[in-house]
Amino acid sequence: MLHSYQLIMSGKGKEKRNSIRLGLAILACVLTLLWGMANGTAVEIRNTATAQGDDLPAVVTSNSTSFTAAPAQLELIKTADRAAAEPGDTAVYRLILRNVGSSGAENITITDQLPLGVNFLEASVQGVLTQGGQGNPVQLAVTREQRLITFRHGQLPARATLTIVYAALITPDAVRGNGRNVAQESRSNMASYVMAIRPGILADCGTLIGRVFEDRNFDGEQQPGEPGIPGAIVFLNNGNRITTDQQGLFSMANVLAGHHLGTLDLSSIPGYTLAPNHYVLERNSLARWVRLEPGGLARMNFAVMPLPESATTLEP
């Protein structure tokens, strides 16, 4: 493909039209430049031009010129505001992308893989472009796919720095992870930061407690004179079973946080049935649905009453 340009020249009252055609060398130079920079290598660009005109005896070839095009060179650094954290803390992460090359970098895309149990807070994202000692806020396009965060920005000029700051919430699940955060721009090095995760005063497990008792006033609460029922069995939704002690109490530690269902097995306490509750309608059931918070305590109480004597006595 030839790029043709027309140059109109006038002289001595006569208009002359000369056609100047630039050869494929120019297009080849541009393609070589783009390919070389995309592959992160410096390339030498050589360029010549040819011209021909109606009154030129032959094609005229220009001298050759050349220059070296250096690609963008990106360096990425990942830091945080703390070396260790525990569930409930908010950590501030910082991404610093420097272009130390002599050419600008287009279509900046940084991927950031968060550790297990670290929740990204999108509203906290801030971007600053620093060039020539002057920092200016910039808008970033942010997308999230589970724990993979992607930041996009249009262009990073030569000798400029793009700084991205965001916050993340440390959850109890982080105790199970390794705390390692990895980020990279496709043309940069891989940057990582490891934050030590300590259990702290919170844990990712909690404790279920409860009691099975004889409710004589049908209010659902154990009061003096209302004895506990020993040997009662409560089944949990994961299939585990708990048996009450001599006071009718039971507990289970190290239960994963979340929703749990407990069901009283009436066959384990012959002679008793569920006591009606005159105050809380949902307690007129053999099941209890509770939410257990990390490091928390959830209670399941079951009120029962003796069966009428006629129901426990076999007729002759």
Image (cartoon, helix red, strand yellow):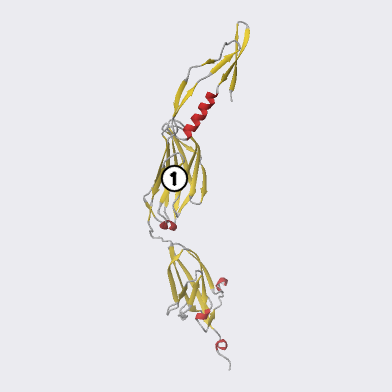
Given residues 95 and 220, the one toward you in this image is 95
Residue 62 x %, y %: 50, 16
Quarter of the image for residue 203 reads bottom left
Residue 230 x %, y %: 45, 80
Q: Which residue does the image show at 46% across and 74% down from the upper left? A: 242
Q: Is residue 216 visible?
A: no
Residue projecting furthest to the bottom? 316
Quarter of the image for residue 250 reads bottom left
Position of the N terminus, as image quadrant, is top right
Q: Is residue 142 visible?
A: yes
Residue 249 x %, y %: 44, 76
Q: Which residue does the image show at 50% across and 31% down from the upper left? A: 34
Q: Which residue does the image show at 44% across and 58% down from the upper left? A: 173
- Up the image or down, 278 lies above or below 59; here it is below
Position of the C terminus, as image quadrant, is bottom right
Q: Which residue does the image show at 48% across and 34% down from the upper left? A: 38
- Up the image or down, 28 lies above or below 281; here it is above
Q: Secondary structure at mark 1?
A: strand
Would you say 102 lies left or right of 1 here? Answer: left
> Residue at label 1?
183
Q: Amino acid at mark 1?
A: Ala
Residue 135 x %, y %: 44, 35
